[in-house]
Image: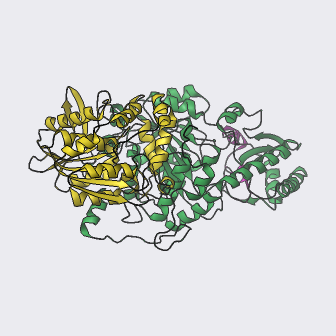
């Protein structure tokens, strides 16, 4: 019988990757190493830790054993070489940009982004000399036209916000690589259980771990993962990305792309970005996210199952004008979703009521099981009415430009019994329908 | 730094340090389908502790030009040529896996040039399974998967490694995937066909350190013991619950063993 490779599958990695029973106590759960710093055995050992001659922990801003378990686990689940846990998903995106780009650089990004990411790219980074061109994520020619000599990365979300455009990672990454650029992907909505962007050509992935990775909605955190595939040591890359290919005075003239063939990005991100910007994760947060990841496979399956039941129900309701969910045949990315997201398209989606802004408000207020708040990816079902909350200053005309109507409702389907969710939605539809 | 060896550019990692002729030199030689970066921590340590470091990429690997060398003997002669190109007459030599066989052969061929010899994950013979050879010959990704699965201990294959944030099985896989088609097959055949190990061991004149992983499947400990029995002056260190990926699983312990020895 031919030899078979030894592998560990997703569900096993979700429980075990990166962790071992605690050598000091035998504790099976990953301990919370709630300490700011770590004792050096001797002066030589201390110097070696600081100079990257030895592996280990120095100070919890740079690394921490509990956070390291989370980092390894997410890297294993994504199929990457390593990861860095950050204070939030926003901190992870900022760390990626700050590690690769300097003043004068340019980003090409999908225009269908989480609002926080859009704010960072459109309003904040230009103050630091980094500009972004936003493009229709479905228009490959627009991506191509937007690339300039100073472009240093392409960026999109696996599922766009709010219309759930499916990012064509194989084609966008191919375009990026033709220009010697990495593709950075926000994979928060899909998690590695639904899709591993590295398998399709993405180079760097990040998550808001606050969402599905945790599931419990009790922490804020992010994770930045490196595929290790982008060759930052190539001649062209060393020119485009001097932060990785040229000597760094801030670390004894280390050339990160020579130090590590596969992970120079992570080296610089930790040795400079986390060190200097300091947006690290607390060990308690890492522990809580790890508790969530242990059940990620079963939760994601249930999220998708419940979402399909809700979508099927809403399709039958006269007051529902349209549902934006890529599993539906009418969605513009239906075929792409079937290819890239065979396990499902997640549990966050929007639908439009045939209703006024006031009717939308009544719909929200009639819900009893759904929680009205600005988050997604919780075990509990969540709802928001953009026209009366996040987009309340916009006119009806401006709302349409943003892909939102006065009757748009965004749902994040949780793990409750779907019958209870359907009853809740039925009550709200009745209330909205009464006008 | 880059050296010219036979008209081909050779890359050697130096720990971002210049070359000091007054210092001893230690050369690190990687294994099949790997490059200098597998010794990142250890080589950097010695570069900052009074030694010149040459962590080489052998031809066809990493940043070095040329085709992969077809035999252990050819790599051994090439190591001597690198030494000459660097204008040094004596050095300490550290090799891992295929690199350990090449270091052994080099020390046997050029005993006057090798001051200390450290063999990490050695075995004589270092036979390779037919399935792995066939997969590598077909440039089938399964070859990398077989190696990765056999190179880590059971615990190490689930992570928990000492380098914060690094998923070493993924890192090892990505490093192998970077090699060109045919390189892994070439390297594995070089290991498989090498028959001069015991004769080379008998010709070694310097002290030797053998670092062995008790759970090594790629280079079984019993074959390392056979090699040690043939070496004239050897110290063997066995790490429990450790596979072939010694520097990934126990970077600090490997460094400490080298520090004591070199």
Picture quarter containing residue A170? top right
Q: Is residue B32 above or below residue A120?
A: above
In the foreground, A393 or A373: A373
Can residue A249 be seen in the rendering of this structure? no
In the foreground, A118 or A279: A279
Rendered yellow, the chain in question is: B
Q: Is residue B236 above or below residue A335?
A: below
Q: Is residue B79 above or below residue B20?
A: above
Image location of residue B151, percent across then percent down: 44, 48
The boundaries of the magenta stretch are A379-402
Coloring basis for residues:
by chain
In which quadrant is the N terminus of chain B drawn?
Answer: top left
Which residue sits at x=58%, y=46%? A187
Residue A4 part of the magenta segment: no
Image location of residue B216, percent across then percent down: 42, 51
Can residue A205 be seen in the rendering of this structure? yes
Outermost bottom residue: A25
Rendered green, the chain in question is: A
- Horizontal arrangement in the rendering, residue A301 relative to residue A434 (left or right): left
């Amino acid at each position: 019988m031919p030899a078979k490779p030894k592998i560990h599958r997703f569900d096993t990695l979700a429980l075990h990757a990166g962790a071992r029973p605690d050598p000091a106590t035998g504790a099976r759960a990953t301990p919370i190493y709630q300490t700011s710093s770590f004792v050096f055995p001797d002066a030589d050992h201390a110097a070696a830790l600081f100079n990257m001659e030895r592996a280990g922990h120095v100070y919890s801003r740079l690394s921490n054993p509990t956070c390291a378990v989370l980092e390894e686990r997410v890297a294993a689940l994504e199929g990457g070489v390593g990861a860095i846990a950050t204070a939030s998903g926003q901190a992870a995106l900022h760390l990626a940009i700050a590690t690769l780009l300097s003043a004068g650089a340019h980003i090409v990004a999908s225009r269908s982004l989480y609002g926080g990411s859009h704010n960072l790219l459109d309003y904040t980074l230009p103050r630091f000399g980094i500009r972004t061109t936003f493009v229709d994520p479905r228009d490959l020619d627009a991506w191509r036209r937007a690339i300039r000599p100073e472009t240093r990365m392409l960026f999109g979300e696996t599922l766009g916000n709010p219309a759930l455009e499916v990012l064509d990672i194989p084609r966008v990454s191919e375009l990026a690589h033709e220009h010697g650029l990495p593709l950075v992907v926000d994979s928060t909505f899909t998690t590695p259980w639904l899709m591993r962007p590295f398998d399709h050509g993405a180079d760097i992935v990040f998550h808001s771990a606050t969402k599905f990775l945790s599931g419990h909605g009790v922490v804020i955190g992010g994770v930045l993962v490196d595929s290790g595939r982008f060759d930052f040591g190539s001649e062209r890359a060393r020119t485009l990305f001097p932060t990785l290919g040229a000597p760094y005075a801030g670390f004894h003239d280390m050339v990160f792309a020579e130090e590590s063939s596969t992970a120079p990005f992570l080296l610089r991100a930790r040795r400079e970005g986390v060190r200097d910007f300091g947006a690290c994760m607390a060990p308690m947060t890492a522990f809580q996210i790890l508790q969530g990841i242990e059940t990620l496979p079963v939760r994601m399956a249930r999220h998708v199952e419940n979402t399909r039941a809700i979508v099927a129900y809403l399709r039958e309701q006269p007051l529902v004008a349209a549902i934006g969910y890529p599993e539906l045949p009418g969605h513009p990315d239906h075929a792409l979703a079937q290819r890239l997201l065979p396990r499902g398209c997640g549990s966050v989606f929007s639908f439009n009521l045939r209703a006024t802004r006031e009717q939308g408000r009544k719909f929200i207020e009639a819900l009893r099981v759904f929680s009205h708040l600005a988050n997604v990816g919780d075990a509990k079902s969540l709802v928001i009415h953009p026209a009366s909350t996040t987009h309340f200053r916009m006119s009806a005309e401006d709302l349409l430009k943003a892909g939102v109507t006065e009757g748009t409702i965004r749902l994040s389907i949780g793990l409750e019994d779907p019958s209870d969710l359907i009853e809740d939605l039925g009550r709200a539809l009745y209330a909205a329908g009464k006008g | 730094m880059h050296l010219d060896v036979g008209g081909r550019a050779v890359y050697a990692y130096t720990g971002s340090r210049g070359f000091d002729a007054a210092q001893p030199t230690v050369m690190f030689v990687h294994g099949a389908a790997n490059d200098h970066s597998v010794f990142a921590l250890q080589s950097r340590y010695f570069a900052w502790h009074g030694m010149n470091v040459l962590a080489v990429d052998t031809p066809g690997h990493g940043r070095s030009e040329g085709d992969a060398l077809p035999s252990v003997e050819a790599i051994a002669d090439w190591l001597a040529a690198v030494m000459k190109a660097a204008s040094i007459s004596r050095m300490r030599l550290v090799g891992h896996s295929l690199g350990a066989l090449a270091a052994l052969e080099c020390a046997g061929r050029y005993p006057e040039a090798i001051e200390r010899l450290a063999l990490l994950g050695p075995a004589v013979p270092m036979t390779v399974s037919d399935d792995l050879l066939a997969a590598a010959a077909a440039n089938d990704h399964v070859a990398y998967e077989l190696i990765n699965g056999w190179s880590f201990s059971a615990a190490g294959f689930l992570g928990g490694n000492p380098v914060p944030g690094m998923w070493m099985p993924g890192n090892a896989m990505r490093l192998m995937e970077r090699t060109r088609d045919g390189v892994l097959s070439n390297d594995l055949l070089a290991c498989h066909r090498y028959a001069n190990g015991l004769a080379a061991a008998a010709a070694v004149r310097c002290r030797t350190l053998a670092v062995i992983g008790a759970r090594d499947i790629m280079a079984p400990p019993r074959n390392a013991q056979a090699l040690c029995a043939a070496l004239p002056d050897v110290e063997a260190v066995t790490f429990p619950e450790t596979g072939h990926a010694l520097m990934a699983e126990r970077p600090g312990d490997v460094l400490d063993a080298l520090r004591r020895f070199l």
